[in-house]
């Protein structure tokens, strides 16, 4: 095995220096009764070629959506990834380093995180951002917990159209720490029911708003803010916005509607779907909350010669200093993926990112219009949407998906079948369709015709 | 053996480095931005003329610029390459950061993770289209069960601390389900990682600290005094953070079980045990592994990692869903967790890309290679201990496991602190060890060489440490002012915290 390279002579020399005869002598502190006598029941090591062949064979048993014409989104989007992202991420300097505890030899990682924080804060329209969390759902759960920590009203108001996986994670984190989850239904148009929301928001805590929501619908965040401001300040919940970052090229950012914290899933900013991870949770906040937020923060400073440099800062919030009083237990987070996001956003830049968002918006509407004209099909909700929408099909969505698959198309998500019991407003005919920048005009039109053909069968 | 002396780099002659480069700072990408530049062209699309306001309510359309930088591809690449070379990393040189297991990251693992057959898999695809990824998870789970001796492994946690958190939630669930919510106290030795107590609190339980014995191990008598019917669990790092095996672990685990509580093993230091001994055989109920440590997935500058947990006995029923199953026909599928299990802890199914690399590593090493990991990691650490014990204060005078902890008290008399030694090592091209942890060793220097380093590298490190020891007596100023050769010198952390500048152009007084 090529990763351990001691020769027999080296080992002898080392054992002599240590003053023992055999390597086993070094394990004497482990009682005999619990030492393994047999080799592990795992195949012996194999060559790189054999292992690669084996792993490729496992891969061949997949049918990746990325290789097909995919309209499956639901929080994970198969977008373009510029070659520069992979090129920078495969630099040993970045991927084989660790958390920048020693800033003098970690300025590369520290400055890229500083630039990441800046881009996330600007995207979100917020004062500042942290260095990342595990993913969108844990970012939402941890921030909701922290914003209610120590408050008299430990409650989180959650709209029905929050992504069901996010809701599930939020419920897990809330359980056992006396954090109450207060549900708010959808209005018939698929948006949050603002009257019900306002009624539920009289008891402090936090209000979560997902933008766009799970159905792809654009919430009227300006109206939500207005409604929230009618609640007396003492009882008014803080707003936690959970946003899909690509939408921020077109939609007003959380800072513009008074979010205290904005979180999101960074996967759509240059990360492959990779069966659900690793992704990167984005967290941005208003200045007032900087000491509450979880995760690492990089700040600028100077060295003894007055040169600009970067360090991990406000570490007194963190577990290695505060232990049980820390704002979070998070230690290792998702630094390399934060770098991917930084390179991705730099690559598209202001105009490219705007164009990307615009393109997704326009293409999704082109497709939705074409589908809406098909006999038997209709958009399930009338509210405005960004790049994803729910289609009411003439047959069960599962049947449509199965039939489309035979033609190399991933038609979308059968919402009721995948998340049974989560949404009273959808049934087995409802199909969630997403459009990314990879879909050409021809593919959009072909998909609409395919649905037309499948609808009648 | 007479150590060869590494010559510290001399300060450059005045004027040798042109003034324009002497500063060494890299302007941010925001400073390099010029309106109109752009590195990436999107695919062709129709409808550029459609205004967003035609499709969205006008009051919800973003106005004004976002403030993303505008650069071309060549400038972008140069920017990040210039930054990259300011990092120390394993592929460049020795990185003995204790408790972090900075071992070599095999390149095949990266090649596997780049296969489109894995990258393109959406987490909500049907099971029949996901047979390869599900089998990867199945095989890794089986392998980790064998390595740990635990009955069932759950691959969902995204990092070690996330695994700790899940485990504490499972224990909490158990005591609530069995009608003992009053059992909410978790014993944490004072040598533990800070993540342990933080995880306990997030799971809605309380902590009580257990002072370690003079030998650095669990004080069994003090533990007995703490065990009562309010205790839910104890979290034990084994080998401990001082690099010693808990010799009385079987007895300790039996004691805790007799008191009706569970024993958690923090598996951060599993690199010392792989193929040698198994937590399951020691009586642990639940544990986590850090795949980015023991199983060599890259540390990525601070993640992503993966922190699977292994579980035995009654706690298994609290493992969250979905769980991978294999039917009689050999087909893999997701199955639900039983009622009462802990709910979801991750957006999807964990850090699959990391799990994939770990499985590749298991296959490359095999049972024979995995055992060599622990043997050589322990050999390397003991070699450093033997070579440094005369010049430095080794806290515990007996064979260590995978890491050795030195005490900073021995060189206080020269006015030199642990931090100074760490900074001076940078001038020798070596990443400093973990410092000031564990808390039970005064001014600790925690050195973990890993199995991957050759005798030559270890000797170079020893030489550097001995040379620094000589400098303490002859020229301590050179240590106190270190580092001298890095891109920046010591940074003002106090200033960073007082005058918070967390974004470019966004100074915030805290």
Image (cartoon, rainbow, N blue to C red):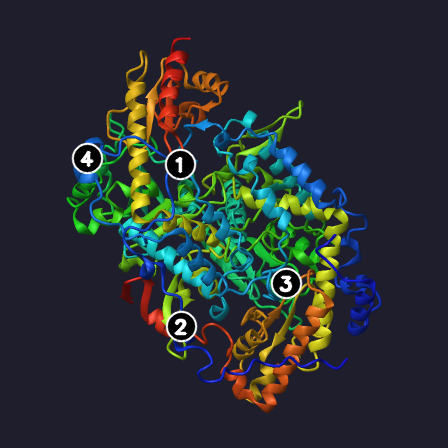
Instruction: Judge from the rendering whether residue B398 lies leftward or rightward of residue A345; answer left or right.
Output: right
Protein chain holding label 1: A
Image quadrant where residue B497 sits: bottom left
Disc 2 with disc 3 on a shared chain:
yes
Q: Which residue is mark 2?
A: B493
Tell us which disc is closer to us: 1 or 3.
1
Q: CA distance from mark 1 to mark 2?
A: 38 Å
In-front residue for pair B288/B4 = B4
On whether disc 4 and disc 3 are found on a single subunit, the reply is yes
Which residue is the site of mark 1? A75
Q: Nearer the viewer, mark 2 or mark 3?
A: 2
If you read the primary sequence from the N terminus, does the residue marked by circle 4 or circle 2 appear first? 4
Mark on residue B240?
Answer: 3
* Residue at left offset 47%, top offset 16%: A403
CB contact under 8 Å: marks 4 and 3: no
- In the rendered image, which residue does mark 4 sit on? B53
Please, which residue is most extreme toward the top here? A457
Q: Position of residue B449 (x, y in %)?
A: 66, 65
Q: Nearer the viewer, mark 4 or mark 3?
A: 4
Write the residue at 55% across / 71% down. B435
Q: Chain of mark 3?
A: B
Q: Separation of disc 4 and disc 2 at Cα?
A: 47 Å
User: What's the CA distance linking mark 1 and mark 4?
Assistant: 24 Å
Report whether residue B400 is seen: no
> Quarter holding the C terminus of chain A?
top left
Q: Are marks 1 and 2 in contact (CB under 8 Å)?
A: no
């Amino acid at each position: 095995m090529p990763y351990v390279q001691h020769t027999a002579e080296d080992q002898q020399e080392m054992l002599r220096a240590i003053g023992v005869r055999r390597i086993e002598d070094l394990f004497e502190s482990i009682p005999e009764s619990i030492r393994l006598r047999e080799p592990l029941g795992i195949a012996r090591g194999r060559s790189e070629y054999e292992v690669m062949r084996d792993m490729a064979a496992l891969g061949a048993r997949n049918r990746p959506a990325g290789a097909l014409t995919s309209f499956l989104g639901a929080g994970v989007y198969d977008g373009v990834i510029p070659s520069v992202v992979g090129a920078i991420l495969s630099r040993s300097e970045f991927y084989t380093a660790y958390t920048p505890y020693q800033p003098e030899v970690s300025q590369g990682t520290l400055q890229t995180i500083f630039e990441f924080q800046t881009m996330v804060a600007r995207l979100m329209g917020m004062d500042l951002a942290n260095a990342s969390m595990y993913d969108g759902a844990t970012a939402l759960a941890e921030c909701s917990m922290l914003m209610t920590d120590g408050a008299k009203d430990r409650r989180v108001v959650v709209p029905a159209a929050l992504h069901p996986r996010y809701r599930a994670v939020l419920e897990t984190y809330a359980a056992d720490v006396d954090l109450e989850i207060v549900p708010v239904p959808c209005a018939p148009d698929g948006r949050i029911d603002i009257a019900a929301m306002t009624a539920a928001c009289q008891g402090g805590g936090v209000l979560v708003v997902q933008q766009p929501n799970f159905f792809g619908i654009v919430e009227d965040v300006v109206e939500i803010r207005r409604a929230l401001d009618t609640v007396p300040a003492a009882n008014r919940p803080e707003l936690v916005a959970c946003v899909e970052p690509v939408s921020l090229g077109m939609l007003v950012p959380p800072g513009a509607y008074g979010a205290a914290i904005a979180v999101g899933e960074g996967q759509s900013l240059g990360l492959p779907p990779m069966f659900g991870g690793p992704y990167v949770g984005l967290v941005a906040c208003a200045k007032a909350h900087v000491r509450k937020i979880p995760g690492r923060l990089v700040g600028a400073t100077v060295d003894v010669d007055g040169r600009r440099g970067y360090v991990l800062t406000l570490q007194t919030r963190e577990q290695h200093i505060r232990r049980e009083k820390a704002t979070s237990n998070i230690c290792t987070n998702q630094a390399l993926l934060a770098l991917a996001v930084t390179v991705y956003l730099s690559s598209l830049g202001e105009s490219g990112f705007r164009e990307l968002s615009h393109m997704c918006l326009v293409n999704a509407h082109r497709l939705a219009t074409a589908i809406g004209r098909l006999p038997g099909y209709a958009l399930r909700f009338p509210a405005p949407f960004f790049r994803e929408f729910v289609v009411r099909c003439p047959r069960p969505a599962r049947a449509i998906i199965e039939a489309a698959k035979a033609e190399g198309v991933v038609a979308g998500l059968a919402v009721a079948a995948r998340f049974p019991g989560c949404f009273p407003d959808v049934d087995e005919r409802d199909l969630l369709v997403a459009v990314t920048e990879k879909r050409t005009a021809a593919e959009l039109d072909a998909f609409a015709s395919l649905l037309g053909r499948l609808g009648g069968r | 053996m007479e150590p060869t002396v590494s010559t510290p780099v001399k300060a450059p002659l005045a004027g040798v480095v042109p003034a324009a480069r002497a500063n060494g700072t890299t302007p941010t990408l925001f400073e390099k931005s010029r309106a109109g530049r752009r590195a990436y062209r999107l695919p062709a699309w129709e409808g550029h003329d459609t205004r967003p306001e035609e499709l969205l309510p006008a009051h919800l359309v973003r106005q004004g610029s976002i403030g993303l930088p505008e650069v071309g591809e060549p400038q972008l690449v140069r920017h990040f390459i210039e930054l990259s070379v300011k990092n120390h990393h394993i592929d460049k040189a020795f990185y003995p950061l204790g408790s972090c297991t900075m071992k070599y990251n095999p390149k095949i693992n990266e090649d596997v993770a780049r296969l489109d057959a894995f990258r393109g898999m959406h987490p909500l695809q049907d099971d029949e289209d996901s047979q390869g990824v599900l089998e990867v998870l199945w095989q890794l789970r089986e392998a980790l069960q064998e390595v740990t001796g635990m009955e069932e492994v759950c691959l969902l946690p995204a990092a070690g601390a996330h695994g700790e958190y899940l485990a504490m939630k499972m224990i909490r669930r158990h005591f609530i389900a069995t009608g003992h919510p009053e059992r909410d106290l978790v014993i944490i030795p004072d040598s533990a990682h800070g993540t342990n107590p933080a995880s306990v609190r997030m799971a809605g339980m309380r902590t009580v600290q257990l002072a370690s014995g003079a030998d650095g191990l669990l004080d069994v008598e003090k533990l007995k005094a703490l065990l009562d019917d309010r205790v839910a669990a104890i979290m034990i790092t084994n080998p401990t953070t001082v690099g010693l095996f808990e010799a009385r672990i079987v007895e300790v685990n039996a004691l805790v079980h007799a008191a009706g509580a569970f024993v958690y093993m923090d598996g951060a230091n599993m690199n010392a045990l792989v193929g040698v001994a198994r937590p399951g055989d020691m009586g642990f109920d639940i544990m986590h592994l850090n795949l980015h440590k023991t199983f060599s997935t890259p540390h990525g500058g601070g993640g992503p990692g993966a922190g699977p947990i292994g579980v035995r006995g009654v706690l298994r029923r609290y493992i969250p869903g979905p769980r991978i199953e294999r039917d009689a026909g050999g087909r893999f599928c997701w199955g639900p967790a039983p009622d009462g299990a802990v709910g979801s802890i991750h957006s999807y199914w964990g850090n699959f890309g990391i799990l994939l690399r770990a499985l590749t590593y298991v296959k490359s090493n095999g049972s024979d290679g995995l055992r060599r990991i622990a043997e050589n990691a322990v050999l390397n650490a003991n070699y450093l201990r033997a070579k440094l014990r005369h010049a430095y204060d080794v806290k515990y005078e007996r064979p260590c496991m995978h890491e050795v902890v030195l005490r900073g008290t021995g060189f206080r008399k020269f006015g030199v602190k642990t931090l100074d030694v760490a900074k001076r090592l940078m001038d020798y091209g070596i990443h400093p060890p973990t410092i000031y942890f564990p808390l039970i060793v005064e001014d600790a220097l925690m050195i973990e060489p890993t199995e991957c380093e050759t005798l030559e590298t270890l000797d170079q490190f020893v030489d550097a440490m001995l040379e620094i020891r000589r400098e303490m007596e002859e020229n301590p100023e050179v240590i106190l002012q270190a580092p001298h050769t890095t891109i920046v010198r010591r940074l003002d952390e106090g200033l960073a915290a007082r005058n918070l500048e967390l974004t470019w152009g966004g100074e915030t007084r805290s």
